[in-house]
Image (spheres, rainbow, N blue to C red):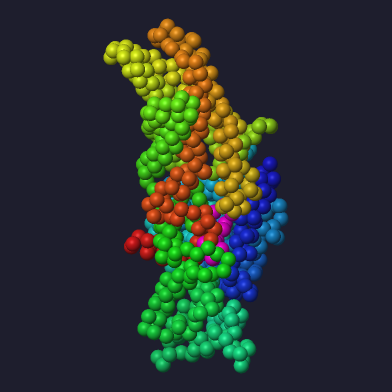
């Protein structure tokens, strides 16, 4: 079973990253030459430990120098299976991690573990063990691994425990400073094969505080040279001189970059264009933009230091890619696009993750805000639906509006409370249904079991029925001109009846949904839009069960409850056709409330399609904007989530958003 799960995971990982590999512009006309050399000796463990030699054997250093296309071979040359990749910001660490995963998968044997990229910056080693954190992240990113494996644990935990997962821990430098030492100590407490990426300074500081990563061979990415740029940049841009067809816009810039200033220092641009990130930005701004001349990078006081050139490239990137009139893409206002992307970058910074998931966009809001907005939107939708049905059936719009207002207020408040208790209080996220309805066959383990659903549904339904029944009883007594005592007795009687009816109906419906769910196929998470469409279909299918079951249970339950309780709680009167009307309204209202408050697709609508655009933090067409940003090269796709293509750009945007 675990072998099959590992193969499924390998397919899912390959599908997640292959599309991104094909989309990267840095591959055109060929990949930039990312190279590395062995890191400093003080960051390296004893070679006898790295080579797993017996006591007394002499451990000779390994020659680990190489290039991007050989990273899988370099890793396999390390007997301990523990490799540290060091490189300054923008040097290509993430590109190398991606290349390693794809190359390792392409040559992997069934006995070898599956390489999976984890953003280690999101790990708190003081709160979660490495094993638990890996299993949790694996479950989140590959929902199929939430199914139960051998021994009752999840497949994710079983895969980690059995050594079938090779963690590629990207971004050690992104961890909070106080967490790097305990993280390194936790990694040293295991012999787990792994690949770790970090900036050199942060890793060296952690090593100084504790020790090197045991049995790990560190390599350090080297800078690009002017010769590398001379081979690459001219092939990415237009030719400028008709008299000399071989001449290009970058040629005079490259000539000046080879020269040094009178004081012997390198030209600032030559210092900046030593990393793949800055080369990619420069290419976007000048090779892909017909009316811009890269010679401007050499002129002016604002370009007289490497820091100013870097800031200029980062700040000019979005205006360049969002310039109006670009073929094949929709025109967005550049200033607004930058603000929206700034909010997204700020949201990811707070969440300490690079993964931009559509179902988590609202988690940047406070839990109380999410619950209140959910209650407001759900109450409004339920109230309008109730009033519309009552108006059509009874022809009494005033009475219908009064009933819709009371139902919307009560139901919206309760659904908001259920959302807060289920997700905010427990710290869970409203994930896209890692589940799909399954009528035939035995359903596997689910994210929500039928038991908790039964309890939540029964309590929520009973609370709604009690409050709504009391209100209905008071209105009924008012129309009959009854006194205060009779009105209270009527309200109490109707409250008891509807409390039992709605409690049983909601508990039954929630439990049924839990029993009919089964985990989502791991390989299906190919793109964010695909997951959104899958979750939408899942929710609509669930509603096809929820609405008629809940509505029928309420309608039939009212008839049964009135018959059984007649005389025990007072005189009960049920008007002809009233139970059918209440059942219909309840089915529609319950389906709306469940969708908006307890499903990922519903929360996407409430928060990302309504609240965040209404408050100016996102555009109204969120999905189209994210997809457009991917096509422009601002974002990349990593399976079911987006990521900023450049971490430095994300950091810069988040900083600008906080200042604004």
141 or 628: which is nearer to us?
628
In the image, residue 281 above or below residue 160: below
Spot occupied by residue 146 in the image (x, y as percentages of width and height): 58, 41
619 or 80: which is nearer to us?
619
Q: Is residue 242 magenta?
A: no
Region rendered in magenta:
629-642
- Residue farthest to the front? 395
Spot occupied by residue 90 in the image (x, y as percentages of width and height): 49, 69
Q: Is residue 634 magenta?
A: yes
In the image, residue 526 above or below residue 216: above
Q: Is residue 465 visible?
A: yes
190 or 198: which is nearer to us?
198
In the image, residue 189 above or below residue 468: below
In the image, residue 415 above or below residue 266: above
- Identify the residue shown where x is 45% and y is 82%: 297
Q: Quadrant of residue 618?
A: bottom left
Spot occupied by residue 143 in the image (x, y as percentages of width and height): 58, 45
Q: Quadrant of the C terminus?
A: bottom left
- Identify the residue shown where x is 59% and y is 74%: 32
- Identify the residue shown where x is 57% and y is 86%: 240
- Residue farthest to the top? 567
- Identify the residue shown where x is 41% and y is 48%: 611
How many numbered badges does the structure rendering display?
A: 0
Q: Quadrant of the N terminus?
A: top right
303 or 247: which is nearer to us?
247
Q: Quadrant of residue 19?
A: bottom right
Q: Does residue 274 appear to the left or right of 75 in the view shown?
A: left
């Amino acid at each position: 079973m675990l072998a099959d799960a590992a193969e499924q995971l390998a397919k899912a990982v390959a599908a997640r990253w292959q599309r991104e590999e094909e989309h990267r512009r840095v591959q055109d006309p060929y990949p930039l030459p990312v190279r590395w050399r062995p890191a400093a000796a003080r960051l390296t463990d004893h070679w006898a430990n790295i080579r797993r030699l017996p006591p007394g054997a002499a451990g000779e250093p390994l020659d680990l120098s190489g290039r991007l296309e050989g990273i899988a071979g370099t890793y396999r040359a390390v007997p301990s299976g523990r490799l540290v990749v060091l490189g300054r910001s923008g040097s290509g660490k993430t590109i190398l991690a991606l290349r390693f995963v794809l190359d390792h998968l392409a040559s992997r044997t069934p006995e070898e573990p599956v390489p999976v990229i984890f953003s280690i910056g999101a790990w708190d080693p003081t709160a979660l063990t490495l094993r638990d954190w890996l299993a949790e992240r694996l479950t989140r990113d590959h929902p199929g691994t939430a199914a139960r494996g051998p021994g009752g644990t999840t497949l994710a935990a079983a895969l980690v425990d059995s050594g079938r997962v090779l963690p590629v821990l990207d971004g050690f430098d992104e961890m909070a400073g106080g967490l790097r030492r305990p993280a390194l100590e936790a990694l040293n407490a295991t012999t787990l094969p792994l690949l770790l990426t970090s900036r050199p300074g942060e890793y060296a500081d952690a090593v100084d505080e504790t020790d090197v990563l045991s049995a790990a061979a560190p390599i350090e990415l080297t800078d690009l040279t002017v010769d590398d740029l001379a081979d690459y940049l001219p092939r990415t841009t237009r030719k400028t001189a008709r008299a000399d067809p071989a001449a290009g816009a970058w040629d005079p810039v490259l000539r000046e970059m080879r020269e040094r200033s009178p004081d012997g220092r390198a030209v600032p641009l030559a210092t900046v264009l030593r990393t793949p990130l800055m080369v990619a930005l420069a290419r976007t701004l000048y090779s892909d933009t017909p009316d811009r001349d890269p010679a401007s990078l050499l002129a002016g006081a604002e370009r007289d230091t490497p820091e100013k050139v870097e800031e200029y490239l980062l700040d000019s990137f979005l205006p360049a890619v969002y310039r109006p009139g670009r073929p094949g893409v929709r025109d967005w206002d550049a200033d607004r696009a930058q603000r929206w992307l700034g909010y997204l970058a700020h949201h990811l910074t707070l969440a300490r993750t690079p993964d931009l998931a559509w179902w988590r966009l609202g988690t940047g809001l406070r839990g109380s805000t999410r619950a209140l907005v959910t209650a407001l939107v759900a109450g409004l939708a339920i109230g309008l639906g109730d009033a519309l049905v009552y108006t059509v059936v009874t022809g009494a719009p005033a009475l219908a509006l009064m009933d819709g207002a009371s139902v919307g207020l009560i139901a919206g408040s309760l659904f908001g409370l259920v959302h807060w208790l289920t997700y905010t209080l427990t710290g869970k996220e409203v994930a896209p249904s890692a589940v799909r309805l399954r009528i035939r066959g035995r359903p596997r383990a689910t994210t929500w079991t039928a038991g908790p659903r039964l309890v939540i549904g029964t309590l929520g339904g009973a609370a709604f029925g009690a409050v709504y029944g009391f209100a209905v009883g008071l209105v009924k007594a008012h129309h009959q001109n009854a006194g205060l005592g009779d009105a209270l007795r009527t309200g109490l009687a109707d409250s008891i009846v509807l409390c039992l009816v709605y409690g049983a109906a909601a508990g039954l419906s929630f439990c049924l949904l839990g029993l009919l769910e089964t985990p989502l196929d791991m390989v299906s998470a190919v793109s964010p839009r695909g997951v959104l469409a899958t979750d939408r279909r899942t929710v609509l299918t669930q509603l096809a069960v929820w609405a008629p079951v809940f509505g029928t249970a309420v309608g039939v339950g009212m008839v049964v409850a009135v018959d059984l309780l007649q005389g025990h709680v007072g005189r009960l009167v049920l008007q002809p056709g009233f139970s059918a009307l209440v059942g219909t309204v309840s089915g529609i209202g319950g389906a709306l409330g469940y969708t908006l408050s307890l499903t990922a697709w519903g929360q996407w609508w409430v928060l990302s399609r309504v609240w965040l655009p209404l408050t100016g933090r996102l555009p109204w067409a969120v999905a189209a904007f994210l997809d457009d940003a991917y096509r422009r090269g601002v974002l990349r796709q990593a399976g079911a989530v987006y990521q900023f293509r450049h971490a430095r750009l994300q950091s810069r945007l988040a900083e600008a958003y906080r200042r604004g």
